Image (tube, coloured by chain):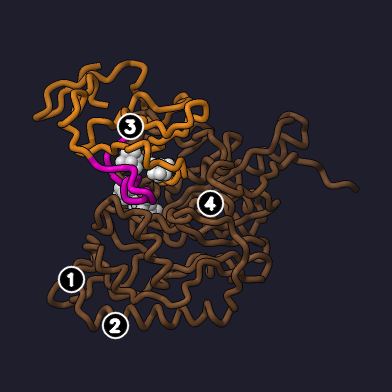
Chain colours: A brown, B orange
């Protein structure tokens, strides 16, 4: 029997900024903080995916700050989900469209189904619904915009908040001078490690717009579940000058705090691997959330990153041709 | 319907924007005009056109989509109504074509919007 043609959309890689779709699908006019990394992330994702997209927005800044007072910046379909169940809502939408297509009641292109979840909505409170969606092999792009905290409720610690960061739930004090003592979860590894239906996982940041858009487009061409982990600095929560949003993401890559890679059916491809990593203090010094740290705490962070960067080397960082970044 | 909020006087929530629990709202087309953010900013980016190479970095850097490339005029166009003044574009511009100018230096600077949102 021939497989049913759902008319999945096809996306070519973008070669330059000029080639990026002009259409804004995440339009101006929203209540995110000035210089919000997740907002820039949203805009680039929506631009790359285009109008034939359904966004699922679990509770978090990218729901609350965007859809305040009944006006939203989404120029495509968008639905709110509970913070716990982005994966479940997406599963239902995808399954419904498949049935409608098979019955001939939906004849157009198959919409992109994208969950735009915060780190809390991905690897903490939203984990089981995401994992179940991936297990059931839905054609859904689950995307984690990582601002490294439960930002919307006032910057509480999440499982991706780095060691040593001050948050409202990890305030530094006499008893616990470093604030946060735990080391973070690794979202892409959680997905890769336990979900055989997932064939494409990648990481990127808002400092790499072309790379970001191309990873979105590539993920959307897969017929099953895919996962993207995106570093989206949050000036409000991390306490840095808001004009440095992209610079923070760039420094994260240059210091090894963040690694850029693609994982395609078992094969790792690393990009933007610095010849020599900068010390993590170069990244941390700009951010008020680390201001209380003593040299011994920074050394502990450095040791953690050195260990993680080793894994990058072991997986063989081969330079792959990516479109030239202008900045 | 008018609602009393202690310390805030009265706000009028128009009937068509009152919702009981959930709602379906119309999608915006080019900009969300119900939520203009121009009065957030203290500084605005000012462009020195001779220095601008049309590299589109500012356009790719703005969370609020306030830079647009107008092909016909071959010019970068700034969308004043929504720029929050975060200065990311100024920070990222590789040629130094953008600088920050105090909002109060402009005749239309810090205009109070008619509606709060
Ligand atoms: C079940 C449930 N618990 C708690 C909340 C409160 N809450 C609303 S937004 C939010 C933060 C979400 O964090 P994250 O997913 O990282 O998104 P961010 O706000 O950082 O963008 C929380 C805890 C909620 N809405 N639902
Ligand atoms: S708190 Fe952070 S993530 Fe939330 S809107 Fe502000 S800058 Fe964006
Ligand atoms: S970033 Fe600077 S040089 Fe590039 S298009 Fe914008 S203003 Fe021009
Ligand atoms: S200052 Fe910020 S909001 Fe204004 S145009 Fe530049 S990047 Fe956009
Ligand atoms: Mg978060």
Whether label 1 touches label 4, CB < 8 Å: no
Q: Which residues are magenta?
A: B83-100
Q: Which mark is residue A292?
A: 1
Whether label 3 touches label 2, CB < 8 Å: no
**Which chain hosts label 1?**
A
Q: Write down the residue under mark 4.
A: A210
Do the residues marked 4 and 2 share a common chain? yes
Binning the other alpha carbons within 10 Å of mark 4 as few (below 14), some (14 to 19) or many (20 upward) gives many
Residue B85 part of the magenta-drawn span: yes
Residue A175 position in % (x across, y down): 15, 77
Q: Write down the residue under mark 3.
A: B82
Whether label 1 touches label 2, CB < 8 Å: no
**Which chain hosts label 4?**
A
CA separation in Å, label 1 and label 2: 14 Å
Q: Disc 4 or disc 3, which is closer to the eye?
A: 4
Residue A184 position in % (x across, y down): 39, 71
Q: Which mark is residue A151?
A: none
Place residue A256 in its image quadrant. bottom left
Q: Disc 1 or disc 4, which is closer to the eye?
A: 4
For image coordinates 77% across by 33% down, the residue present is A103
Residue farthest along the front direction in this orientation: B50
- Nearer-the-camera pick, A6 or B110: B110
CA separation in Å, label 4 and label 3: 24 Å
Q: From the viewer's perspective, is residue B5 above or below residue A13?
A: above
Q: Disc 3 or disc 1, which is closer to the eye?
A: 3
């Amino acid at each position: 029997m021939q497989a049913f043609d759902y008319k999945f959309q096809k996306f070519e890689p973008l070669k330059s900024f000029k080639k990026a779709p002009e259409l804004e699908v995440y339009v101006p006019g929203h209540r995110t903080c000035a210089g919000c990394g997740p907002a820039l992330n949203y805009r680039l994702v929506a631009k790359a995916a285009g109008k034939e997209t359904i966004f699922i927005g679990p509770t978090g800044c990218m729901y609350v700050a965007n859809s305040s007072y009944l006006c939203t910046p989404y120029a495509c379909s968008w639905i709110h989900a509970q913070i716990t169940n982005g994966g479940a809502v997406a599963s239902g939408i995808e399954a419904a469209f498949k049935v409608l297509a098979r019955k001939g009641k939906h004849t157009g292109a198959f919409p992109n189904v994208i969950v735009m979840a915060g780190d809390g909505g991905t690897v903490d409170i939203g984990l089981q619904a995401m994992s179940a969606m991936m297990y059931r092999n839905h054609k859904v792009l689950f995307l984690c915009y990582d601002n490294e905290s439960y930002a919307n409720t006032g910057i509480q610690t999440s499982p991706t908040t780095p060691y040593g960061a001050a948050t409202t739930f990890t305030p530094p004090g006499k008893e616990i001078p470093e604030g946060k003592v735990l080391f973070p979860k690794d979202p892409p590894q959680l997905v890769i490690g336990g979900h055989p239906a997932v064939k494409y996982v990648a990481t990127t940041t808002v400092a790499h717009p072309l790379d970001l858009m191309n990873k979105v487009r590539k993920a959307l061409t897969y017929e099953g579940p895919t996962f993207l982990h995106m570093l989206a600095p949050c000036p409000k929560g991390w306490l840095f000058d808001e004009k440095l949003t992209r610079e923070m993401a760039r420094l994260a890559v240059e210091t090894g705090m963040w690694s850029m890679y693609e994982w395609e059916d078992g094969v790792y491809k690393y990009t933007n691997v610095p010849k020599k990593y900068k010390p993590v203090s170069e990244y941390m010094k700009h951010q008020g959330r680390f201001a209380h740290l003593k040299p011994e705490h920074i050394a502990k962070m450095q040791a953690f990153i050195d260990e993680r960067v080793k894994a990058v080397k072991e997986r063989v960082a081969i330079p792959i041709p990516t479109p030239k970044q202008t900045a | 319907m008018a609602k009393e909020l202690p310390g805030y006087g009265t706000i009028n929530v128009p009937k068509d924007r009152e919702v009981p629990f959930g709602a379906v709202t119309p999608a915006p087309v080019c900009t969300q005009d119900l939520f203009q953010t121009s009065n957030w900013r203290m500084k605005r980016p000012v462009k020195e056109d001779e220095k601008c190479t049309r590299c589109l970095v500012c356009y790719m850097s703005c969370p609020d989509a306030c830079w647009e490339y107008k092909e016909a005029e071959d010019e970068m166009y700034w969308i004043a109504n929504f720029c929050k003044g975060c200065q990311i574009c100024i920070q990222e511009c590789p040629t130094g074509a953008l600088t920050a100018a105090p909002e109060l230096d402009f005749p239309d600077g810090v205009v109070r919007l008619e509606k709060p949102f």
